[in-house]
């Protein structure tokens, strides 16, 4: 039977002759070693390139010195040549600096990488480095010491980091990105991911994040977090908490099963929520306090107290599906001036939409249906408008106004 060499033989793999039937088994079994060989080869090539650049730089420097030695005789004539040569040297310096930046560091708990723990790798990293974490389970806290670091796992199903000590599992006070990890906080009081400090900026992508007693993700003032394509779940506290003065966004993520609120926006947080599934909280799915956030294209359901609670502020709530809460679909509380438009709000037991005292909300172009009580409940001293909605099949009234003074314009609605 014909034999072939391993494709990684050019990088040093010892398997020179393999039967075709053996090749796939060899590639699977030796994948970690092959990756290590490729990394070694990349380092060699980088070192060679750096050496060649340094030699070229030395040659150009000798030429420059020669020009300088005779410059006093023909200074004007050499001005343009010297400037051009200095530009070449500056460009060469920049090339060498770029070669020295952005290293890739491999972590493998089984010992096949340069490091066996993520913390040891982070301690050796410089700005711009990437830490690649191979599949396995790691028990440690992650403190990112330098700016512009990336930790990249092999997917949350394969790369797990857990911690049960009295500290946050991940602490970030700089600019960083974490992708492809499952992060599990097993201590009853501390958050899983804590981001704090002026200018701190963390991107969480394709991660599975859970906590026992503290928030899954906690963002302090003057910090920014982007949660994208991730699952955040299971805390007895809140899932994601943006504190006053923080910023960020939660996009295309699942946030579920938390004991207080799934997503909590505290006063003054500047956060956008887009294209998420937010469900199964024992409190509120989304609680927004004194914020002007964009809450768009989310699916919010099965949250016990409220699906969405708005406490003051002027958020824009649009194009969401908000349904099947044992409590209220959208509860707009005192002081809020929010706009609720183009949503599907239905099957919420304790009214689909409630306008509380002192609100000035605009409820426009929504479909509001199948509540066990009222479609829209307008409480005393509420202001605003309920205009051009389709309100149907609610067991109570389509629009119920409590006794007391309320100045809400109800106009152009299709009621059934």
Image (cartoon, rainbow, N blue to C red):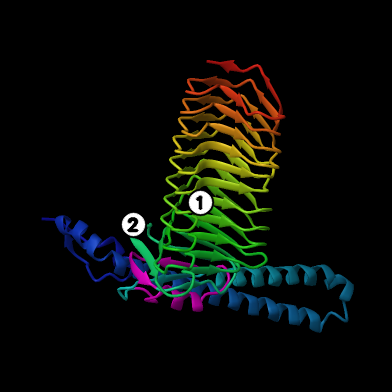
Tell whether 188 sits left or right of 60.
Answer: left
Q: Which mark is residue 261?
A: 1
Residue 59 highlighted magenta (yes or no)? no
Tell whether 85 sits left or right of 249.
Answer: right
Q: Position of residue 219 (x, y in %)?
A: 58, 60
Query: The N terminus lies in which quarter of the figure?
Result: bottom left
Which residue occupies the foreground of this view, 415 or 381?
381
**Mark 2 falls on what kind of element?**
loop
Instruction: Say whether residue 129 is visible.
Output: no
Q: Which residue is drawn at 42% across and 69% down?
A: 187
Say which quarter of the image contains residue 407: top right
Which residue occupies the foreground of this view, 262 or 283?
283
Instruction: Say whether residue 195 is visible.
Output: yes
Tell whether 48 sits left or right of 86.
Answer: left
Residue 136 highlighted magenta (yes or no)? yes
Q: Residue at x 36, y 70 (%)?
A: 138
Q: Which of marks 2 and 1 is nearer the N terminus?
A: 2
Q: Which residue is drawn at 43% across and 73% down?
A: 118
**Mark 1 falls on what kind of element?**
strand
Task: Give the residue number, with chain letter if any, for mark 2.
Answer: 157
- Magenta residues (range): 113-139
Q: Position of residue 355 (x, y in %)?
A: 63, 34
Foreground tag (2 vs 1): 1
Q: Residues within 10 Å of mark 2 (few under 14, many from 20)?
A: some
């Amino acid at each position: 039977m014909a034999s072939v060499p391993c494709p990684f033989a050019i990088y040093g793999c010892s398997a020179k002759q393999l039967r075709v039937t053996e090749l796939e088994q060899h590639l699977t079994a030796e994948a970690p070693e092959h990756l290590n060989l490729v990394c070694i080869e990349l380092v060699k090539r980088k070192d060679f390139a750096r050496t060649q650049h340094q030699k070229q730089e030395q040659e150009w420097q000798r030429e420059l010195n020669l020009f300088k030695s005779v410059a006093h005789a023909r200074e004007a004539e050499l001005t343009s040549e010297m400037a051009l040569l200095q530009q070449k040297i500056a460009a060469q310096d920049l090339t060498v600096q770029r070669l020295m930046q952005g290293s890739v560091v491999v972590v493998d708990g089984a010992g096949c990488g340069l490091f066996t723990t993520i913390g040891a790798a982070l301690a050796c990293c410089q700005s711009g480095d990437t830490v690649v974490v191979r599949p396995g389970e790691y028990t440690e806290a992650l403190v990112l010491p330098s700016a512009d670091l990336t930790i990249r796992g092999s997917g949350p199903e394969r790369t797990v980091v857990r911690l049960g000590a009295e500290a946050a599992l991940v602490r970030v006070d700089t600019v960083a990105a974490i992708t492809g990890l499952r992060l599990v906080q097993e201590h009853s009081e501390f958050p899983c991911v804590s981001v704090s400090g002026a200018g701190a900026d963390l991107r969480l992508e394709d991660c599975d994040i859970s906590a026992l007693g503290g928030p899954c993700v906690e963002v302090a003032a003057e910090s920014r977090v982007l949660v994208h394509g991730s699952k955040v779940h299971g805390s007895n506290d809140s899932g994601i908490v943006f504190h006053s003065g923080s910023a960020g966004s939660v996009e295309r993520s699942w946030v579920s099963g938390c004991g207080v609120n799934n997503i909590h926006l505290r006063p003054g947080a500047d956060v956008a929520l887009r294209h998420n599934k937010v469900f199964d909280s024992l409190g509120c799915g989304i609680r927004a306090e004194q914020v002007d956030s964009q809450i768009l294209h989310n699916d919010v359901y099965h949250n016990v107290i409220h699906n969405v609670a708005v406490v003051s502020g002027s958020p824009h709530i649009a194009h969401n599906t908000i349904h099947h809460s044992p409590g209220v679909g959208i509860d707009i509380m005192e002081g809020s001036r929010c706009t609720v438009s183009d949503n599907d709000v239905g099957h919420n037991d304790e009214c689909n939409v409630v306008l509380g005292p002192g609100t000035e909300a605009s409820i426009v172009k929504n479909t509001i249906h199948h509540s066990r009580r009222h479609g829209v409940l307008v409480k005393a001293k509420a202001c605003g408008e309920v205009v051009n909605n389709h309100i149907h099949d609610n067991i109570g009234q389509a629009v119920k106004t409590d006794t007391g003074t309320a100045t809400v314009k109800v106009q152009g609605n299709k009621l059934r």
